[in-house]
């Protein structure tokens, strides 16, 4: 399975073309590779119900040149192979190391995108960070936490063309699934599945 460039497997599409799919086809193809969805205490899953029986995440990275448009959840089940692709996409690109991203954070990202009512993908600035990368970033900025949730695969820094930091943060905050940080001067929003809180301007 390719790990660079546009991610293309049976249940994805690239940013430039559409792939038709049916619910029955997806379920048949991935029935053996699903895992039960973990319970969530946030509103993210509720907002995602409006998208039907699938959950999709759309992102791109200027750091790696990769993009992803991934159906990662079908009728109550996460698709293991899809999550592996998401984990790789959200890796620490500086060290080329990945870890299992918390599915709650993935759900918050997907729900926020739906609430923004756009087909635009998120630009991923930072997903998982290794301790080495986090130390390097802390040496450059006072805004990087020593015990960042990025280290645990529970956070992402994102921006979106055509949507302001305020709009993105409002959508993420409606999910009530974790932390939402507004960084208007740097044009990105931090989302995580930790304690529900909002900061920044």
Image (spheres, rainbow, N blue to C red):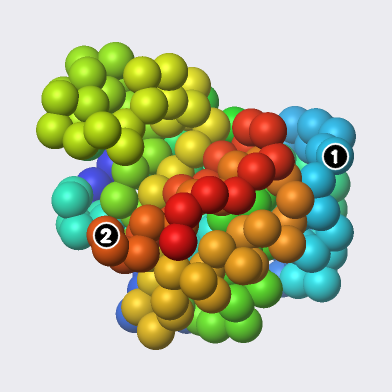
Among numbered discs 1 and 2, the one appearing first in the sequence: 1
Q: Quadrant of residue 88?
A: top left
Residue 160, horizontal then vertical, whole percent: 39, 71
**Residue plotted at (63% across, 67% down):** 171
Q: Quadrant of residue 59?
A: bottom left
Crowding at dot 1, Cα within 10 Å, few <14 / some 14-19 / many 20+, comes out as: few
Residue that label 2 marks: 186
Residue 200, horizontal then vertical, whole percent: 46, 53
Residue 196, horizontal then vertical, whole percent: 70, 41
Q: Nearer the viewer, residue 105 or 137?
A: 137
Crowding at dot 2, Cα within 10 Å, few <14 / some 14-19 / many 20+, comes out as: few
Residue 81 shows up from this direction: no
Q: Are marks 1 and 2 in contact (CB under 8 Å)?
A: no
Query: With 129 as the anchor, is 29 left or right in this view?
Result: right
Q: Nearer the viewer, residue 153 or 56?
A: 153
**Residue plotted at (43% across, 25% down):** 148
Q: Nearer the viewer, residue 113 or 169?
A: 169
Q: Nearer the viewer, mark 1 or mark 2?
A: 2
Residue that label 1 marks: 41
Query: With 65 as the anchor, is 129 left or right in this view?
Result: right
């Amino acid at each position: 399975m390719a790990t660079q460039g546009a991610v293309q497997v049976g249940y994805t599409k690239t940013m430039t073309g559409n792939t038709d799919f049916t619910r029955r086809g997806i379920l048949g193809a991935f029935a053996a590779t699903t895992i039960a969805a973990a319970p969530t205490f946030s509103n993210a899953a509720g907002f995602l119900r409006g998208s039907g029986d699938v959950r999709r995440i759309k992102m791109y990275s200027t750091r790696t040149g990769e993009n992803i448009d991934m159906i990662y959840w079908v009728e109550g089940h996460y698709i293991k192979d899809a999550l592996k692709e998401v984990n790789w996409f959200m890796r620490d690109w500086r060290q080329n190391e990945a870890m299992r991203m918390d599915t709650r954070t993935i759900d918050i990202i997907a729900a926020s995108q739906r609430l923004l009512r756009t087909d635009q993908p998120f630009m991923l600035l930072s997903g998982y960070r290794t301790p080495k990368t986090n130390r390097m970033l802390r040496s450059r900025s006072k805004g990087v936490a020593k015990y960042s949730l990025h280290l645990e695969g529970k956070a992402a820094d994102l921006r979106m063309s055509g949507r302001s930091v305020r709009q993105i943060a409002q959508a993420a905050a409606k999910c009530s699934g974790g932390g939402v940080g507004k960084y208007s001067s740097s044009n990105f929003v931090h989302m995580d599945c930790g304690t529900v809180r909002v900061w920044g301007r």
